[in-house]
Image (tube, helix red, strand yellow):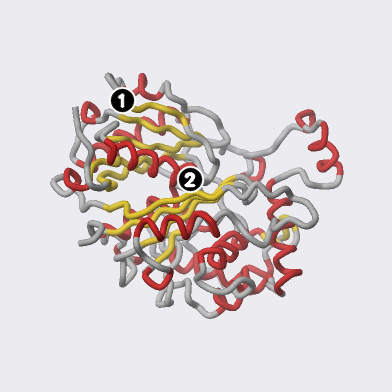
Amino acid sequence: MTGPTSGAAIAGLGMTELGKVYGRSPRRLAAEAVRRAVADAGLTLADLDGLLVSHGMGGSPGIELAGTLGLRDLRLLTQMNAFGATAGAMVAYAAMSVISGAASTVACVFADAPLRPKQSAGSAYHRDAREWYGYGGMTAALGFRSVNAFYALAARRHMARYGTTSEQLGAIAVATRQWATRNPLAQMREPITLADHQNSRWVAEPLHLLDCCLVSNGAIAVVVTGADRARDLAQPPVHLWGWGQGHPGHGRERGSEFGLTTGAAVSGPIAMKMAGVGVGDIDMCQLYDCYTYTVLVSLEDYGFCAKGEGGPFAESGALGPGGALPTNTGGGQLSAYYMWGMTPLSEAVIQARGHGGERQAPRNDVILVSGNGGILDHHSTLIVSPHAKGA
């Protein structure tokens, strides 16, 4: 039996091939990612006594993954889902379990495989017309048949309230691609310009194609254990300083804050207070960027700029290489790979370890990681560091 520990850290990171990866089910991909994360930490599967599982839109895996991996005598096993906020929630749950002594070594994994050979990425999340019924059928008849349409509505509301422009969203896409050109794992590495962004086709106005994230197959896992133990393992520990969640619960209706504020406004202060840091202490951000707009509104809600000033902040060059606030340094979900909240988390681990290579940011002492789920419905925040808290 293990007792309570003073802190928790990420000790292992496992990533499968990401992108157009065919021929493997989400469960097989998840199992591979867990095995890689355990090996990365210098551990074996027998060292795990906890497993937290999240799946994407393609379904599978669930808690049956424990059997696939041959795990025995687990003290923690569950399937979690807050959509894109799940990775942050899983890591927080794992950290609390480790700190309390409920478990000692917990793997957290996400896997998805929505892409199919000879099918477009746009068809990966297509819903059959027969699935629309009730209120959903009425909104579908009005043209709201995809998540893209709802995020376009959110972005349009922000534009109407604050004067945010498409060019400002484009600045985020360009900065993110600049980082991706330095990441050998990124799906999209060709540089783009603001003109490229403006000339890319509409997906749902005001969102262009280059405002929207990729679709990827693959899996990513991390291993969370006690901070003291992590120091003696194979990789530099990534210490978990703070975490928080925010679930606004606002309806997409007149008079609500939909499109103007997100759960980051709640989860951010909680995580930073736990970590004992403020906005000015954050060296870099790994933000959930399902759309360029999501980055912009998250930056505002975290307090990196005033509400309504996200557009000028992005245009200033702060987010790209050489900027004051390096953001999504691996290329994010817009240009690297789309693994829900595991995309920003994996890059945070890489940066905290100092393993970013050509894209390594100059300062990595305090890193903010965000997850966004649903249509601005759920949010998670982590504060991580290569240093033990209070050291």
In the foreground, 310 or 315: 310
Q: In what quadrant of the picture does the C terminus appear?
A: bottom left
Residue shown at 54% from the left, 30% from the top: 59
Picture coordinates of residue 207 (x, y %)?
Answer: 69, 61
Residue at mark 1: 75
Q: Residues within 10 Å of mark 2 (few under 14, many from 20)?
A: many
Q: Which quarter shows the N terminus?
A: top left
Q: Viewed as shown, does residue 233 lie left or right of 139?
A: left
Q: Are dots 1 and 2 in contact, CB under 8 Å? A: no
The residue that appears at 25% across and 41% down in the rendered structure is 225
Give the structural element (helix, strand or loop) at label 1.
Answer: loop
Q: Position of residue 74 (x, y in %)?
A: 30, 23
Q: Amino acid at mark 1?
A: Arg
Q: Residue at x 43, y 32 (%)?
A: 53
**1 or 2: mark nearer the eye:** 1
Question: Is 38 or 387 nearer to us in this picture?
Answer: 387
In the rendered image of this protein, does residue 324 appear above or below residue 113? Answer: below
Tell me the kind of residue under disc 2. Met
Specify the quadrant of the image occupied by residue 257: bottom right
Nearer to the camera, 213 or 348: 348
* Res 187 seen here: no
The residues bearing labels 1 and 2 have C-alpha atoms spaced at a distance of 27 Å
Q: Which mark is residue 339?
A: 2
Q: Secondary structure at mark 2?
A: loop
**Disc 1 crowd, CA 10 A, few/some/many (<14, 14-19, 20+):** some
The structure residue drawn at horizontal position 69% and vertical position 38%, both measured from the top left corner, is 126
Counting from the top left corner in percent of width and height, residue 221 is at: 36, 40
Say whether residue 186 is left or right of residue 145: left
